[in-house]
Image: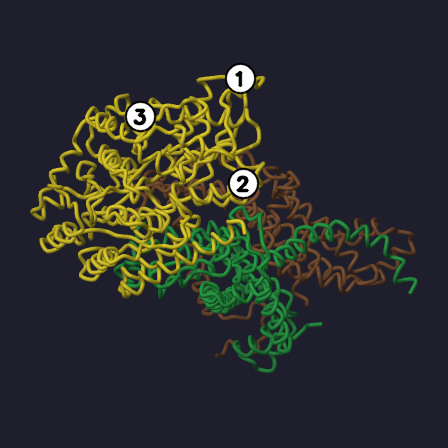
Chain colours: A green, B yellow, C brown
Amino acid sequence: MRRRWRDVPAAAALLAPSAALLGVFVVYPLARAILLGTRKCNVSGRVCKTVGWHQYVTVWRSAPFQNALGNTLRFVAMTVPIGLVLGVGLAVLADKQLRGIGVFRTIFSSTIASSVAVASLIWLVLLNPQIGLLSHLLKDAFPVVKKPGLLNDGGTAMWGVAISSIWAGLGLTFVIVTAALQSVPRELYESAFVDGAGAWRRFTNVTLPMLSPTLLFVAVVMTARAFQTYGEIDLLTGGGPNSAGRPTETIAYLIYGKSSKIRNDIGIQSATAVLLFVLLLVVSFIQFRVLERRVHYAE
Amino acid sequence: MIRTRRTAATLTACVLALLAGTASATTPPSGSAGAGDALAGLPGCDPAALDGAGGPVEITVWSSMKADLLNKTMEDLTNQFNASQTQVKVNYVNQGGYEDTIPKFLDADQRSRPDVVQLPEYMVRSIVDLNTAVPVGACMTAASFDTSAFIPSALAQYRVEGVQWSLPFNVSDPVLLYNKKLFAKAGLDPNIPPTTLDDVVADSKKLVDSGAATYGIAIDSNFDNGGGWFLEQWLAKLGQFYTDGDNGRTARATKATFATPEMATLLTQFQQMVADKTAVYVGDNNSGADHLLAMADKDHPAAMAISTSASIGSVLTILKGGQFPHITPDDVGVAPMPGPGAKGTLVGGASLWINDSGDPAKVAAAWKYLEYMTQAQTQATWAATTGYVAVRTDAQALEPLKTALTDPRFTVAGQQLLDIPAAPTSAGPVVGPLLEVRTAVAEGVAKILTGADVAATLQEMQDQATELITDYNDRNTAG
Amino acid sequence: MPSDRPDDRPALDRSSPARTVGRYVLLVVVALIVLAPVWAILMQSLKSGPDSVRHPRSLLPVDLTWDTLRHAWRAGDLGRLSWNSLVMSVLVTAGVLVTSLTAAYAFAFLHFPLRRGLFAVFLATMLVPAEVTILINKRTIESLGWKNSMVGLVVPLLATGMGTFLLRQVFLQLPQELREAASLDGLGHAKFLWEVAAPLSRPTLAALGLLTFLTTWNQYLWPQSVVDDTAHRTLQIGIAHLDNGRVDNINLVTAGTVIAALPIAVMLIAFQRHLVRGLTAGAVKG
């Protein structure tokens, strides 16, 4: 009991900076946003009247939110599994002591260097049907990049955004999985080898179980990121094409986007943002619960 | 009859000035006794406050000119203002485009807002509702500002319920750009562009059938172009209101009224053109240039596109650059916006607003800057360099604009603006959420152009617009 | 598959030459795919004028010129903007390392009431989307009078739940006896933290520092929200401003992206080992 209290002064001193910063710049805004979500505010966002908690229900049920929710889930389902599989694939491919492997590792991790803005601009230059290089060069080979083009077609626009996002996220996934691979004890492979396990069996029986905590971590981070996708949408599609009923408007884009109809309405913006947070919380919780049971912890 | 009016585009500056004189004579000058009453209770403006200030008064100006050429020119003019006098020093900050400036300005604390901000025509009602703007009408009255040379419709665009809120700086209008070479190839007279939508349909068919062009016209659904702004223009040409309250000019708008049979007919015409491939639909046009690029397409060109007059300068500059060797600057013709009805279009572009900083000296300094930016010589330079229409007709007699206007293509939009009648339907809608309404309208237009049922979709668009207006009014009016 | 049989070659060099060649081919192909967009952008920014767009030649390394990069650098005032980004990123990185170290130390080595609860709150902050906080934080910064200042840019980013979490993982793996021995030697918390715990977690610190620097350098929404003068703009905002709506200027934008990504790419190549090693030590072992 004495021990429980003895460290309090030191703990307070050491925790004060982080706690204060996180309190003021994360917890307080969250609380404020939750409250604002129950209000209706004027165009300056400073003169508000209280509507009540049912505003959250109204927002949740509204057509734009439901559309954005569906799009966000679709985007997550597109980018997370593919990004994960590609990241693991690249890491396994490069996890070999070969001459010059460092060069390949650097290349594979290189997309970390690009911000969302940079990556989206790159893909805009490549995919835009009017100025796009890829569209121009490949339009004969691949009909899909013909006009109206990947990004202007309701059926493929989200894939255009997803490609940019997967590409930009590949580097980080690769680096983290590579790190995890290197910490897998080599003896485990040796013994699997001795047991006559083939390459695929070694991968499923040794590599995957040993990687599982990392994969859980990466999956959670990737999902959280995908749920908050904004920049790619802003630069590549603006939530459109409108002809298909805003098939790329994600929740984050609904909150901030240039062509969002709630952008100058801070009450609805806040309610939407809080709903996004709750959604993330629930999804992360489920991920931990479901995946944890299948994850093999090394220690 | 209307077609012969095309040749009016070639009229010279002195004729324009003459027309301006007659137009302004019929409009009561701002700053009359009536305006003074409307100004009661609003923040005041005392241009003399500048003389009391010891030393130069520093003010901040936010501009919203995204295009390189426009931004540079505006900055140069601001620097010239700084150099021309010692009482005011302007700190010029470009915030990007309108969509960048708007949320920044709205979200900001009153004390961190700039003293002067450049905002587009669709923001009028919102800024009035902020209750933080100094109506320039107050400065005009106090300074006995002479507005007789201004294009009347340009001033009227920024006047609500009798109060002149801001001063137009960059004025534009939609015009038709067309490829004369392709017109000639199709056997059409390159000097007689279409003036009605029926003409557009007929000419497009000829252009396509003759093999001269792949498409007659390129259309888009950008909210600030074919998806939203143009619809307001066509409604004005038809002499119809966009909302109640006389487009929100005499009383706060409460509902949208644009779903008229004539609008349905117009949208059906465009839908039909896209369906039979005499028009190409270029989508949401996020770049703002996709409809023009469709005209420049080497393999599958469109012969026409409707665009803001502010783009003419950039289009000609780019074509001069030789990136599109199959089309030269001389191939481009400019004509008034085709459409139904005989009435005029609406004023587009942006105006300069004075923000009430609570410091009379800063308000006076801001007014001095506005005076400079709208004086004849400044506007002559501005319009000649950018392709915008000068807000005042006396600028047309000054260089470099005088020379620039010898190219008839640069006179079209100005003439179109002067042709705007004094009818109530010819003052554009002032609706709080006009940006949001346009966004909703643009979504509907996109659906219609790709085949959705016109009547049902148009009704849906109007219902959504009314819903947005109701919600906005609920949030922004007391009680 | 004969090569799958155990043999007496060293463990890491077991593959047959054929498989090694196959792996190399695969590596090269994948590397080309990953690099292709980068290549396209690089070529764009090394071409002059409008003819770089929409032309097959624009992907070939012919007629290269520095003009576009130079123009972008000058037109966007990218020198000053890079400096702003650099200062911001360095300050945030240093701050995050310090606050994470101290907080992680408290959670790993100290006993106090509500420790678990408080740690859970720290973890939960990772899940609060920026969309939620930015709306309110820009007002907080404004009311503090920190708009258009480096302080306003930096302070809200100085603490992260992620940093605390990563370092606590590392600290927990340090033998408990180490702390006890230090205690016997009369080493205080501060001394132990700086002289023993921090040096021992250097790989993770490096990785955390690198990742923090990267994320800060690439921040867009936050600087855009609290800066509205030209003096405090960051590089990412500057690039967005390079897009001036002219189709024939697209290579100016690509040049800007190259300039923005270059320092990060160099850092990455230089410190990639640390990144991998640091992450191995930290997050990986749940």
For mark 2, give the secondary structure.
loop
Q: Residue B162's image quarter? A: top left
Callout 3: few (<14), some (14-19), or many (20+) C-alpha neighbours within 10 Å?
A: some
- How far across and how far down the image is residue A104, in percent? 50, 57
The residue lying at 35 percent from left, 26 percent from top is: B147
Dot placed on the residue nearer the N-terminal end, 1 or 3: 1
What is the secondary structure assignment of the residue under circle 3?
loop
Rendered location of residue B123, percent (x, y)? 42, 43
Residue C108 percent location from the top left of the image: 78, 60
Say if residue C274 shows up in the picture. yes
Q: Is residue A142 above or below residue C265?
A: below
Hey, which residue is sitting farthest left in the picture? B187
Residue B383 percent location from the top left of the image: 31, 30
Residue C234 is marked as: 2
Is residue C284 left or right of B170 when viewed as pictured? right
Q: Quadrant of residue A276?
A: bottom right
Gap between marks 1 and 3 measured at Cα: 27 Å
Q: Which residue is mark 3?
A: B149
Quarter in which the N terminus of chain B is drawn: top left
- Badge 1 marks a residue whose secondary structure is helix
Q: Amino acid at mark 2?
A: Thr
Identify which amino acid the numbered label 3 is placed on: Ala
Q: Between residues A11 and B260, which one lies in front from this camera angle?
A: B260
B207 relative to C51, above or below: below
The amino acid sitting under disc 1 is Asp
Q: Which residue is mark 1?
A: B51
Tell me the subunit letter for badge 1: B
> Would residue A247 be found to the left or right of residue B238 on screen?
right
* A131 to the left or right of B408: right
Q: Nearer the viewer, residue B293 or A20?
A: A20
